[in-house]
Image (cartoon, coloured by chain):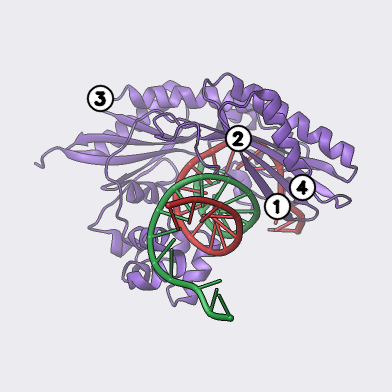
Chain colours: A purple, B red, C green
DNA sequence: TCTGGGGTCCTAGGACCC
DNA sequence: TCTGGGGTCCTAGGACCC
């Protein structure tokens, strides 16, 4: 028998949003369900989640709703109901925290890391799945790893409703020949730049010359990618409560706008919402960001540092300086406003530099 | 195919200071 | 005329994730 040792579990709900919708509307079971935007496929919106039945037709997250509807004419298309998913998510996280010895780090609505000391991680994972199912009627998959990165990637091999273990021992065998894009944190851009360096697989990334990577990606990211290739990294689940760095709101216009007064009105409305939502926070706003997407798809951002002492009117005044940078007469598809808050514990609290968060 | 909305973190380059 | 070396701060933008 083996001794208890620390493990990282990554819990990921299966087709979470679609599953929540099916739970409250059982006759949807077995049908292709697509959740996105306001549920209107004639609008500019994308798919948030597709049920497994819909995925079989090639519909997935991020796809324009219009395209999804074209692929599956008889799909059930539902609007995003964030409060409902948040409530379901809270129940899941509460269940995770109630497990013996569990340290829980929430990653999003439908996933979390669970740190636990056990001699039987698979058994623990199965009990966890059972507990979540009994409490919420939702199914989840669980990855088991000796690092957060390995646990996270392991989950994909367990889907749906399964458990998979990925550690230093089988990392190379399981991941070595796979494309770098399958790593958590390597997207299509970085995988292409890696390919130009002759690095195509996870094993090649793991063995790459550090100087080659730091030369291409900078000192921090270069070494980070190499570490990803090895599956190495943090081993301890951190349940420190999350403190948001900022808050933002953006709108895509159903029809592009041009009129400057309309642009200013839209920007002010977004700003009001953001400042209202941030007002419940006792931290001052120390940065502002404005994002504009000119049609069809050219995005510009403007940022401005704000003194922590600025009152709401002063913040609005600064925001309008940013709005003034928008090119007049150019059709606008999207407008976004972001407020950045001082971080507690920051030695320079109130002087936090604006890190553009877009 | 034609691309939402909410986040996080990193890098480059210019301004400015000593 | 040709012009160092290092540091911090700020702005813009890139990339990624759910």
Quarter of the picture containing the N terminus of chain A is top left
Disc 3/disc 1 C-alpha distance (Å): 48 Å
Chain under callout 4: A
Pointer 4 and pointer 1 on the same chain: yes
User: Which mark lies nearer to you, 3 or 1?
Assistant: 1
Instruction: Name the side, left or right, on which A303 lies relative to A262.
Output: left
Q: Nearer the viewer, residue A139 or A292?
A: A292
Chain under callout 1: A
Q: In this view of the protein, can residue A201 be seen by the observer?
A: no
- Residue A346 location (% of width, % of height): 41, 34
Q: Which residue is mark 1?
A: A300
Q: Which residue is mark 4?
A: A325
Looking at the rendered structure, the secondary structure element under dot 3 is: loop
* Contact check, label 4 and label 3, Cβ < 8 Å: no
Chain under callout 2: A
Of the image marks 1 and 2, the number of the one nearer the N terminus: 1
Looking at the rendered structure, the secondary structure element under dot 2 is: loop
Residue at (60, 44) in percent of width and height: A53
Of the image marks 4 and 2, the number of the one nearer the N terminus: 2
Disc 4/disc 2 C-alpha distance (Å): 17 Å
* Contact check, label 1 and label 2, Cβ < 8 Å: no
- Residue A6 location (% of width, % of height): 20, 39
* Contact check, label 2 and label 3, Cβ < 8 Å: no
Q: Which residue is mark 2?
A: A306
Q: Nearer the viewer, residue C1 or B14?
A: C1
Q: Which residue is mark 3?
A: A100
Pointer 2 and pointer 3 on the same chain: yes
Disc 1/disc 2 C-alpha distance (Å): 20 Å
Residue at (69, 45) in percent of width and height: A291
């Amino acid at each position: 028998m083996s001794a208890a040792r620390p493990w990282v579990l990554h819990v990921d709900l299966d087709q979470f949003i679609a599953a929540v919708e099916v739970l409250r509307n059982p006759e949807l079971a077995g049908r292709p369900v697509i959740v996105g935007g306001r549920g209107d496929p004639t609008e500019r919106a994308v798919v948030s989640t597709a049920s497994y039945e819909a995925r079989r037709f090639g519909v997935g997250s991020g796809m324009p709703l219009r395209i999804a509807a074209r692929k599956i004419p008889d799909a059930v298309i539902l609007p995003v109901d964030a409060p409902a998913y948040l409530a379901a998510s809270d129940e899941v996280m509460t269940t995770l925290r109630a497990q013996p010895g569990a340290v829980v780090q929430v990653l999003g609505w439908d996933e979390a890391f669970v740190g636990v000391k056990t001699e039987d991680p698979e058994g623990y994972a199965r009990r966890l799945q059972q507990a979540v199912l009994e409490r919420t009627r939702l199914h989840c998959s669980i990855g088991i790893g000796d690092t957060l990165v390995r646990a996270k990637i392991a989950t994909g091999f367990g889907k749906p409703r399964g458990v998979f273990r990925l550690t230093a021992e089988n990392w190379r065998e399981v991941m070595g020949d796979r494309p770098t894009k399958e790593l958590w944190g390597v997207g299509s851009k970085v995988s292409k730049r890696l390919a130009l360096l002759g690095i195509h697989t996870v094993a090649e990334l793991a063995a790459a010359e550090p100087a080659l990577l730091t030369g291409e990606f900078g000192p921090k990211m270069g070494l980070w990618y190499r570490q990803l290739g090895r599956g190495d990294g943090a081993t301890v689940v951190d349940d420190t409560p999350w403190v948001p760095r900022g808050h933002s709101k953006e709108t895509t216009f159903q029809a592009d706008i041009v009129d400057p007064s309309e642009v200013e009105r839209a920007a002010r409305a977004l700003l009001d919402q953001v400042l209202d939502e941030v007002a419940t926070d006792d931290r001052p706003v120390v940065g502002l960001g404005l994002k504009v997407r000119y049609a069809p798809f050219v995005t510009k951002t403007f940022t401005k540092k704000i003194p922590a002492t600025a009152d709401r009117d002063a913040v609005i005044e600064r925001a309008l300086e940013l709005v003034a940078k928008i090119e007049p007469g150019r059709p606008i598809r999207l407008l976004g406003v972001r407020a950045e808050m001082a971080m507690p514990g920051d030695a320079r609290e109130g002087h936090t530099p604006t890190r553009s968060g877009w």
